[in-house]
Amino acid sequence: GAGVSQSPRYKVAKRGQDVALRCDPISGHVSLFWYQQALGQGPEFLTYFQNEAQLDKSGLPSDRFFAERPEGSVSTLKIQRTQQEDSAVYLCASSSDLSGGFTDTQYFGPGTRLTVL
Amino acid sequence: AQKITQTQPGMFVQEKEAVTLDCTYDTSDPSYGLFWYKQPSSGEMIFLIYQGSYDQQNATEGRYSLNFQKARKSANLVISASQLGDSAMYFCAMRAYNAGNMLTFGGGTRLMVKP
């Protein structure tokens, strides 16, 4: 079956512009995660959804970052008034939650590389 | 808080040889899962192998095995018979039961396979 898809794959924005990044999880996956990966580093958690509920947004770096998953499937990560420090790869992952808790494997999409000029 | 440490920023291995990528972790939670992911230059994170904190045996998946030493808090990835396509970044990650559902990642190891 299809994996996690993300669009666009690449986005160039001028400082101050708003951007929207889309994630299509694996069909039927309950949980959805967003991570930010700076160049040369490991991914860092941003936010987590279980169905349409945003259960954890502790990793969002500022109030310029907003995520939603209104129908419990597709999710959008929005960044307002982009800054140069927002330049990174944004990864989306989903998991089925069938086994529950810490054993569930997260499957990642290809990421969106955001460059803020 | 959870922490993952990968002390090898880069490693070379000869094709067809085995290689071990190191990972140590820190958590006070007795229930946790450890994951290894591969990230080729294309950028996608590919799941390789999983080890649960209560698993008695080391996990294996094809050419990948996880050397889990719970007392030492280490979860090293062993790749047997390296192939050129194994050249990539490798990330160790943890998910603790009482720490939310997110993965905590290490800084990664870049593996380069020489022909």
Image (spheres, rainbow, N blue to C red):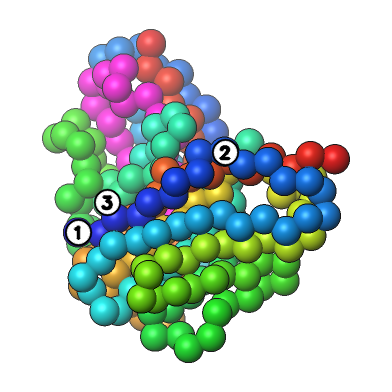
Secondary structure at numbered mark 3:
strand
Magenta stretch holds residue B112 = no
Asked whether disc 3 touches disc 2, contact meaning CB atoms under 8 Å apart, the reply is: no
Relative to A72, residue A64 above or below: above
Q: Residue furthest toward the bottom? A: B56
Q: Position of residue A70 (x, y in %)?
A: 29, 55
The structure residue drawn at horizontal position 38% and vertical position 11%, both measured from the top left corner, is A117
Secondary structure at numbered mark 2:
strand
Q: Give the alpha-carbon distance from disc 3 to disc 2, as whole Å.
A: 30 Å
The N terminus of chain B sits in image quarter: bottom left
Q: Position of residue A3 (x, y in %)?
A: 59, 58
Q: Position of residue A91 (x, y in %)?
A: 44, 44
Q: Is residue A108 visible?
A: no
- Give the extent of the magenta segment: A76-94
Q: In which chain is the residue bearing label 1?
A: B
The structure residue drawn at horizontal position 29% and vertical position 22%, both measured from the top left corner, is A85
Relative to B99, residue B88 above or below: above
Q: Give the alpha-carbon distance from disc 1 to disc 3, as whole Å.
A: 17 Å
Secondary structure at numbered mark 1:
loop
Q: Amino acid at mark 1?
A: Ala
The structure residue drawn at horizontal position 14% and vertical position 35%, both measured from the top left corner, is A63
Residue designated by label 1 = B1
Q: Which disc number belongs to residue A47? A: 3
B17 with respect to B52 (left or right): right
Res B29 quadrant in image: bottom left
The structure residue drawn at horizontal position 36% and vertical position 40%, both measured from the top left corner, is A36
Residue designated by label 2 = B10
